[in-house]
Image (tube, rainbow, N blue to C red):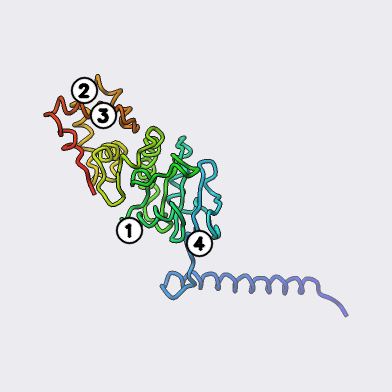
Amino acid sequence: MRIDLKRILLWVVAALGVILLAAQVAANSSVVTALSGKPQPTVEATPIVAQNATFHLGVTSNSTATTETDGALIGTIEDTNLGRAQAELLAEGAKFNLIILSNQSIGLEGEIYKDLIKRNIRSTTGPDEGFDTSSLDCYPTCIFVPIGVLNELSVESWTYVLRHEERHTIQAGNNPNLARDFRPTMDGPFTTYAAFEEAYADDGIYVGENIYHASERMPKLKMVLGASNMATYERACQGDQTAYQDIVNIYNSKAGGKGAFETLFPPYK
């Protein structure tokens, strides 16, 4: 029997063509289905962490985590807008630790999580909301974020929020009593000291302008203090209590007497 190799080869080529065409049609059908709005399999766009753990994400390793409670890492912080913002700031030389909290974080971290959720706050260093975090390994560079908001802001917006919080970490490093000085009791108001330090943390960033009014208050304060007191002002902005008391006294003496500084930076809820 004579074998026509040329004809066999043509058959093989034709068969491969049919297979490839079928594959392409199937692929195109999937695209059309996806674009048509018909039901598609649910895909989690940003699976980060199971909702039952606290994860510490260090300044030198923002894509890995270790658990404080039982739970599993099912994604990486780099997959989120928060993670991308963190990466940008770390590349610029920022120094902070992200602590991602969930509804089963325990101990102090659990209390911070509940407070953030109750008051609808996206992030905190702890002391700036009245929590003493000095017992934690990350102190004073902790920044706590609830797991549910990691993609709630754009990358750019998260960089502003993290810059604000990083300023609080510096304040905490310079004032071991920052939590008490911000909020003497957890159910009480925030102090004038807190209002001043928050305004500084937000100066030029303005993520909390509706609360801290940094664009109005900080220029007025600097104008009254004058250039000769800027070194003291800078130390006060960094959390130093002695420098803070000095600028309070200087401002009061120049701007109308006792209580003038508190009028500029009133306590708040």
Residue 82 position within the rendered picture, expressed as x and y whole percent measured from the top left: 43, 50
Residue in the picture at 41% in, 51% down:
145
Comparing 147 with 153, the one in front is 147
Of badges 4 and 3, the one in the foreground is 3
Figure quadrant of the N terminus? bottom right
Residue 245 numbered mark, or none: 3
Of badges 4 and 1, the one in the foreground is 1
Residue 50 numbered mark, or none: 4
Of labels 1 and 3, earlier in sequence is 1
Whether label 4 touches label 3, CB < 8 Å:
no
Of badges 3 and 2, the one in the foreground is 3
Comparing 185 with 119, the one in front is 185
Of labels 1 and 2, earlier in sequence is 1
Q: Which residue is mark 1?
A: 118
Q: Amino acid at mark 2?
A: Gly
Q: Which residue is mark 2?
A: 226
Residue 79 position within the rendered picture, expressed as x and y whole percent measured from the top left: 49, 54
Label 1: state its secondary structure.
helix
Could you give the CA–CA distance between mark 3 and mark 2, rounded to whole angstroms? 16 Å
Q: Is residue 164 above or below residue 36?
A: above
Comparing 120 with 22, the one in front is 120
Whether label 1 touches label 3, CB < 8 Å:
no
Whether label 3 touches label 2, CB < 8 Å:
no
Crowding at mark 1 (Cα within 10 Å: few <14, some 14-19, many 20+): few
Taking 6 as reference, is 109 left or right?
A: left
Could you give the CA–CA distance between mark 1 and mark 3, rounded to whole angstroms? 33 Å
Label 3: state its secondary structure.
helix
Residue 76 position within the rendered picture, expressed as x and y whole percent measured from the top left: 52, 53
Comparing 172 with 152, the one in front is 172
Label 2: state its secondary structure.
loop
Q: Residue furthest right?
A: 1
Residue in the picture at 44% in, 39% down:
140
